[in-house]
Image (spheres, rainbow, N blue to C red):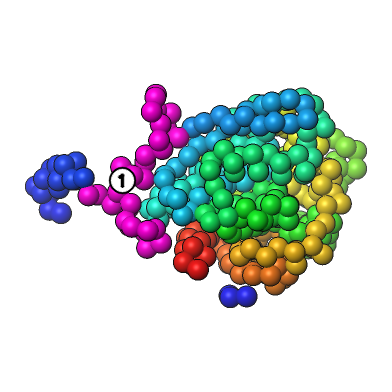
Amino acid sequence: MRKLVLFSVPLLFLSFLCSCEVKVKTANTPKDITVAEYFNYGDTGVQSAGIKMIPIQTPAGTFKVWTKRFGNNPRIKVLLLHGGPAAGHEYMECFESFFPKEGFEFYEYDQLGAPYSDQPTDSSLWTIPRYVDEVEQVRKAIGADATNFYVLGNSWGGILAMEYALKYQKNLKGLIVADMVASCPDYGRYAYSVLAKQMDPKVLQEIKAIEAKGDFSNPRYEELLMPNFYQQHICRLNPWPDPVVRAFTHLDGTKVSKQIYVMMQGPSEFGIAGRLTNWDIKNRLKEISVPTLMVGAKYDTMDPKAMEEQSKMVQHGSYLYCPNGSHMCMWDDQQVFMNGVIKWIKEVDAK
C-alpha cells in the first residue's frame, strides 16, 4: 500500500476559435487530444449533449437508465456510481469541474429507480445481484473493457462497486471505493458507538425515542438529524452546494426512489436498518486483484481507519485520506479528494 492584457483578449479569443490544434493536455493518452476529438461522441444525428437512455434487461422486463457522457478517451473511461440507493447522479456533478481538464472520459449515471431513470415498482428488483448485472450492461453499452474501465462508487455506490469487482473484475482496469466500509454491521456499530456519542445527549435521546416509535415521517426527526448528523457527517459545507440539495430533494420527492432508499438503507443515514443491514464482504476483499483505491474521511459516517484497513485487504490497494472531509468528501474536502483520485487514475493508466 502507498500512502492579458485587456485589448489582447479579442485577438486571443479569435485565435482560439480559428485554431484546429487546441488540445486537452493529458500525459496519459496516446497523443494530446484536441477539443474536437474530446467532444466527438460519434453521434451522426441530433446531438444530445452526451445523454443516452440505456436499455437494461431485468427479470421484470426491459427498462431504461439515464447516462451522460463527458469526453472521448479510449484509455480512461470512468463510470460514477452514486449512493442512496436511488440518490441519483446530481451530487456527483462536481466531477465535471475536474475530469475534463485531465482528458478523462466519464459517465454520470442514474441507476434504475433513481429520479432520472425508469422507476419500476417491482420490489424484487432492488437486490445487489440485480444492480451488479445492471452495471455490467451499462459497461457494455459504453464500450468499456479491462484496458480502460474504472468504476468509482460513493456510499451505496461503493457497495455496488465492490460487488461488481467480485463478479466482473476481469472487465475492470481500476476500482475506487469512496466512503463505504465492506461491512454494514460495522457501519451500524460505528454510527451508534462512535458518532452518536458525539451528539448532545438530549438530542440523541429524542432521536432514539422517535426511532423506537417508528415515527420517521415526523418532521422533528429531520429537524434533529440535519444539524446534528447530516451537517456534521454527510456534507460539512454551509450552505450545501446546489447539486447536493437537488439530489436530496429529488430522492425525497420521488416516490419510487424514496421507497427504494428506505427499503434498502432504512429511514436515514444514521445507521442502517434496511435490506443491506447484514451485508458484509470483508472476508472476500482478498479476492479483488485489480488496482483499488479506498477513500476515507475524518468526519465520515464510515470509520476512516476501517477504510484504510480495507486498502490492505485487497491485493493491490491504495488509501486516500481526506482530513477535512465527510461522507461527501468530493465536496467538503474537494481538492484533496480530486487531486488524489486523479493522481491514482493516472498512475494506474501508466502501468
Location of residue 229 with respect to 123 vertically, above or below = below
Could you tell me if residue 4 is visible in this image? yes
92 to the left or right of 57: left
Q: Residue at x 69, y 52 (%)?
A: 168
Say which residue label 1 marks.
35
Label count reads 1
Residue 303 picture location, percent across and down: 72, 64
14 to the left or right of 180: left
Q: Residue at x 52, y 31 (%)?
A: 52
Location of residue 306 with respect to 92 vertically, above or below = below
Q: Residue at x 33, y 57 (%)?
A: 31
- Hey, which quadrant is residue 195 in on the image? bottom right
Characterize the local packing of mark 1: few (<14), some (14-19) or many (20 or more) Cα atoms within 10 angstroms: some
Asked whether 298 or 35 is in front, the reply is 35
Location of residue 176 with respect to 106 vertically, above or below = below
Q: Quadrant of the N terminus?
A: bottom right
Residues drawn in magenta: 21-50
- Hey, which quadrant is residue 184 in on the image? bottom right
In magenta stretch: residue 36: yes
